[in-house]
């Protein structure tokens, strides 16, 4: 019985983490990579709305430690349709 309670508690904590704007993108990344069939486009908002593609040198998956408003999209067109523009390459 204790194992069921512990497992249920961990599932609830994980679901809360998925919905949290700080930890959510980091926990959602493997799902997007699987369902998109490739690394997803990472969109963020810091002074401006921008996105980074996997081909860019500055690309990195959203981390669990970095606070910020990050979103994941399968394609650049999907990110652009939500108001994001491509980041300058660096």
Image (spheres, rainbow, N blue to C red):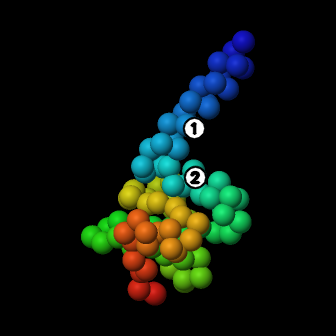
**What is the number of the mark on residue 27?**
none
Q: How many marks?
A: 2
Q: Is residue 44 visible?
A: no
The percent position of residue 88, horizontal first and vertical second, equals 41, 86
Q: Secondary structure at mark 1?
A: helix
Q: Residue at x 47, y 55 (%)?
A: 65
The percent position of residue 8, horizontal first and vertical second, equals 63, 24
Quadrant assignment for the N terminus: top right
The percent position of residue 16, horizontal first and vertical second, equals 50, 36
* CA distance separating discs 1 and 2: 11 Å
Q: Is residue 20 visible?
A: yes
Please name which of the two marks, 1 or 2, marks the residue nearer to the observer. 2
Q: Is residue 29 above or below residue 48?
A: above
**What is the number of the mark on residue 14?**
1
Asked which quadrant contains residue 38, the reply is bottom right
Farthest left residue in view: 47
The percent position of residue 74, horizontal first and vertical second, equals 58, 66
Q: Secondary structure at mark 2?
A: helix
Quadrant assignment for the C terminus: bottom left
Farthest bottom residue in view: 89
Q: Mark 1 or 2 closer to N-term? A: 1
Q: Residue at x 41, y 65 (%)?
A: 82
Residue 4 located left or right of residue 81 = right
Q: Is residue 10 above or below residue 68?
A: above
Q: Residues within 10 Å of mark 1 (few under 14, many from 20)?
A: some
Q: Nearer the viewer, residue 4 or 44?
A: 44
Q: Is residue 68 above or below residue 10?
A: below
Where does label 2 land, which residue? Answer: 28
């Amino acid at each position: 019985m204790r194992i069921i309670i512990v497992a249920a508690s961990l599932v609830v904590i994980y679901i809360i983490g998925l919905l949290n704007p700080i930890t959510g993108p980091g926990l959602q990344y493997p799902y997007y990579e699987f369902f998109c069939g490739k690394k997803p486009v990472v969109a963020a908002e810091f002074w401006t709305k921008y996105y980074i593609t996997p081909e860019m040198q500055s690309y990195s998956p959203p981390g669990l430690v970095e606070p910020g408003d990050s979103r994941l999209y399968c394609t650049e067109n999907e990110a652009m349709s939500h108001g994001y523009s491509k980041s300058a390459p660096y």
